Amino acid sequence: MYSEYRCLPASSCLEMNEGTSPEQAASCFVNPLTALGMVRNYEK
């Protein structure tokens, strides 16, 4: 998942606000999924 370059359909991309760094953009997608996984594991 982590790479410098990746080819994929434009429909798979998220548009970020101007000034958003690549690091910030990556964490916008990954961190919420990590939190969701933690909550689901806690519920068990």
Image (cartoon, helix red, strand yellow):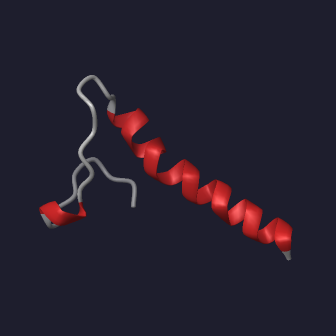
Instruction: Report the residue at 74% width, 61% height from top.
Output: 38
Residue 37 picture location, percent across and down: 67, 65
Residue 3 versus residue 17 in the image, above or below: below
Instruction: Report the residue at 45% width, 44% height from top.
Output: 28
Residue 40 picture location, percent across and down: 74, 70
Total tally of numbered discs in the picture:
0
Residue 18 picture location, percent across and down: 23, 26
The quarter of the picture where the C terminus appears is bottom right
Residue 44 versus residue 23 in the image, above or below: below
33 relative to 27 in the view: left or right = right
Residue 4 picture location, percent across and down: 27, 47
> Looking at this rendering, what residue extends furthest in the bottom direction?
44
Residue closest to the eye, 36 or 4: 36
The quarter of the picture where the N terminus appears is bottom left
> Looking at this rendering, what residue extends furthest in the top direction?
19
18 relative to 38 in the view: left or right = left
- To which quarter of the image does residue 23 belong? top left
2 relative to 15 in the view: left or right = right
Instruction: Report the residue at 50% width, 53% height from top.
Output: 30
29 relative to 42 in the view: left or right = left
